[in-house]
Image (tube, coloured by chain):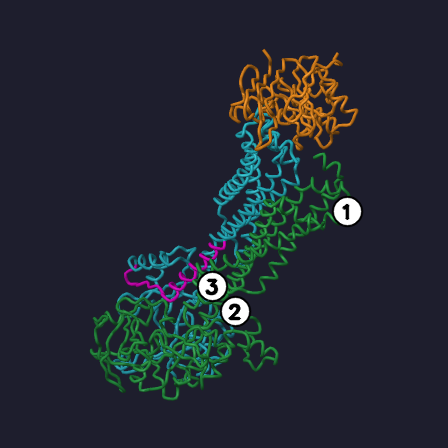
Amino acid sequence: MFLRMIRGAFSRQIKKMLMIALTIALGASLATAMLNVMLDVGDKVNQELKTYGANIIVVPKSTSVLNNLYEVEDGSATAGSYLKESELGKIKTIFWAFNIVDYAPFIEAQVTLPDGSGAVMTGSWFNHHMELPTGETLDTGIQNLRTWWDITAGDWINEQRDASENEIMVGEALAKRLGITAGDTLALSSGHADKTLSVVGVFSAGGDEDEEIFAPLGIAQEFAGAEGFCSSIEVSALTTPDNELAEKAARLGPGSLSVSQYETWYCTAYVSSICFQIQEVITDSVASPVRQVAESEGSILEKTELLMVLITILSLIGSALGITNLVTASVMERSNEIGLLKAIGATDGRISALILSEIMITGIVGAVIGYFAGIGFAQIIGRTVFQSSIEMKLLVIPVVAVLVLAVTLAGSIPAIRMLLRLRPAEVLHGR
Amino acid sequence: MNKRKFFLKMITSSLMRRRSRMLVALLAIAVGATILSGLVTIYYDVPRQMGAQFRNYGANMIFVSSSGDAEFTPEAAERAVAGIDASELVGYAPYRYETVLIHEQPLVAAGTDLAGAKATSPYWYIDGAWPAADGEMLVGNERAELLGLSVGDTVTVIYSTEQDEADEAGVTAEASLDMKVCGILETGGSEEEYIYLSMEDMERLTGNEGKLDLAELSISAPGEKLQSYAERISEAVPEISARLIKRVTESESTVLTKLQALVLLVTIVVLLLTMICVATTMTAVVTERRKEIGLRKALGASDREIIGEFMGEGLLLGGIGGLIGAGLGFAFAQMVSVNVFSSSISFQFWLIPVTILVSVAVTGLACLMPVRSATEVDPALVLKGE
Amino acid sequence: MSLLELNNISKIYGDLKALDNVSLKVDTGEWVAIMGPSGSGKSTLMNIIGCMDKPTSGEVILDGKDIAKESAKNLTAIRRDKIGLIFQQFHLVNYLTAVENVMVSQYYHSIPDEKEALEALARVGLAERARHLPSQLSGGEQQRVCIARALINYPEIVLADEPTGNLDEANENIVLDIFKQLHREGTTLIVVTHDPEVGEVAQRTITLEHGKILRDAKNPGFE
């Protein structure tokens, strides 16, 4: 009989039930979408922040001289202060290999231009193709690490083309000085090599790189006389904003941590633990965070995540109130029916059970529909904003389920209690 | 009592005496309006607030000399800086580089306005303290290791005039200054090779003043505006060429655009769903009153009059809900701003009327549909009313 | 000329003939009871007289004008001007006080006049209860508010649908006394009922069965 009454209620009030289901579905989809976006926004923004370039720089341990920004002096490195090119692949084998988005080796060589003046040639990867031991492939290089470069003439060097060995790119300022552009050739010499190379592209970097020549790693190694070596590696990694533990590890070194702290630290993608892991695989290297990038990333990530958390909370409250509201309204609307049920002798318990099960069934249907709609909304947001899909977190399912259950109950119970207090005769007489 | 008065009386009675139902409706509208005004305020404030965060990346514009040889005067730089809106200027740091000797080793010393450097390069990590008095300096981490310096040490910094000049004069002019290392600078970049001292110390050391090699500026403004600043400055102060640091400006606009798109899209989705929620609640509230609509029809009310009354009620509710929501939404946005960005939000006054209008429109539309369908029903059927 | 004249009206719902070729006349000042069991067509007849429904065929002449073919909009206007309705379930607006409920009717008709509305309530003996909400009134009192509302615009016809259906004996008598009073004042009354006691006090009783008029007779007991 009970089931029959529920079925009866559904067929009679199909429209009303549909509306409740719709509202619950809307609320649930909002919760699902916002929770999923919120949980994934960190990774997504992190990816976006990679446009700032490398956040870790790896240099040989023995050298202390980096090529400085303002070209005040030239630190021509000695033979001992190089990193081995053959070890580069190992960076993709560290614990947090998955978080290494891009990286590229660099080597500098002093070259003499046809007019006798000197210039810096920097060798690097452009879109280097790598086959990883894990079977994955990776295309990495400065094409990804110098997203702010404008190619003013020609194109990037394409390493994956056969003829790329003798190609170079020239900075805008230097190109202007030499009066060359893409398609020209340039004869360069140094103490180690003497070659004529073809210019495939001119770039504007908005910095000192505008005065430099960029060449594939092999050519620059020849000119520097350091085959098989590089002088620094820039690494762009997805990192977790630092907390106290990470600060401590960075300040005092990993040795200062207790065993469990060390494990937590090692297994979290802090910039310091990634640096540590890189040092482990690259012989005689020092990996340090580029504070300009790493710091700012941390704060921007944190702010964005907090912002999304608060917006999510607002929309959760909004959808909770929305559902509670409609459920209350629809229960109150049924005063007549409740009066009738009481008049024919139904106990309060049975009436409550009847109404609650109706609403719960509606709620479950609505929540399931809403969950899938919410996934759709999350994907729309992900695709539109980040051009990649939002990862679905299983955690969202119980959260949404509990939310819907709680707000549906919260919406119906006070209304039912209120109606049960009414005397049947009053209700039936339409007061 | 005239017709309009009675109309108002009916509407207000309906709102006041059916309190629980009306609260339900009002709550729904207020929640919707809160979300609307809160999210839109945040949406408008995100670029500004986030932009400030992006200034952590440091300088986005530099001044260099426009004539090939590297120097320009501080006065020219001051004039150029004056052209930038003070509220947008986060930091300005002039730099002068000289080669000096410490422990017989050549290295680069940078003279700067240290407070300005702190503002333009917020990512600098100082082990120790920022120089507070004359005779104090920062030493880059690399350089400190190389020279074996640590915080608290005092060293002699020697400045010698350039070699060729010295040859002509036959002697090498030398000046020296005892400087205390008050902090070790860590950046992970080339700054770690330098030492940093105040411009005054630099001038005392070198014995001449009035020249700069470079100036860094951190300006909180979108890309196009920076570009126009750079062009204006290069034009107004011919000895200076203002350049954007592409790495910072380009990346900032890329990321900021995405962030704003994210908040926009989230706002749209949340608003859309909330508005539908408000509409369904209003529909439920109105549908409940079909009987009353039937009665009014039986008493001789025209469809227009009935729609007018219900809309009047709806619009009043929408207005009140919108007003409450506009206030709560601002409070929410303010809370977000204080918690996330630790600064207060800029209040968009136009949002109040817009929030109210949207609430009124949504409520009106949500009422209109069920009222319309109710007026189409035969009053006799409604009144017989099961 | 009669105030209301129904000529050969039929109302057909699908296969069901709710009214089958019914003709009747009601003169000004008459008190007519329409009786019959459930399904006899009295509700349909009442709806047609009350301008809330239209016959499938036939003429409805009210005040010399055929309203059978009028649009719903015009019917609403006619109902507002000429008909006063009394319902079995009273149908008061639950958030308006007694006097305001009466004024609603004035409002749609012309302009609300509180003094007049209070007088109307006084006539049905509710002067004291004018400021109460329907939920604070008994069934009989609510019905009297409903009557006051029906009378307020001086309708040509007062149409009552089972006016005592929801009332106890005492309240039924109060309502019937008001009807007698109205009749004496010259109001045209049409009462639809299945209660013989209510039917008997009328001047004339029309009995319906299966959509046809079974009997139409002056009431011998009418004083």
Tell me the amino acid under the disc marked 2: Pro
> Where residue A265 sits in the image (x, y, percent)?
56, 76
The magenta segment is B237-266
Queried whether the magenta region covers residue B201, the answer comes back as no
Please state the chain letter of the residue tagged with numbered disc 1 in the rendered image: A
Sequence-wise first label, 3 or 2: 2
Tell me the amino acid under the disc marked 1: Thr
C-alpha span from label 3 to label 2: 23 Å
| Marks 2 and 1 belong to one chain | yes
Provide the secondary structure element on which disc 3 rests.
loop
Residue that numbered label 1 is attached to: A347
> Where residue B322 sits in the image (x, y, percent)?
55, 43
Closer to us: A294 or B81: A294
- Colour of the chain lettered A: green
Please state the chain letter of the residue tagged with numbered disc 2 in the rendered image: A
For image coordinates 63% across by 13% down, the residue present is C28
> Where residue B12 sits in the image (x, y, percent)?
61, 33
Q: Is residue B293 above or below residue B71?
A: above
The single residue placed furthest to the right in the displayed view is C170
Task: Determine crowd level at label 3: few under 14, some 14-19, many 20+ residues with C-alpha closer than 10 A.
Answer: some
| Marks 3 and 2 belong to one chain | yes
User: Is residue B160 at all visible to an observer of this figure?
Assistant: yes
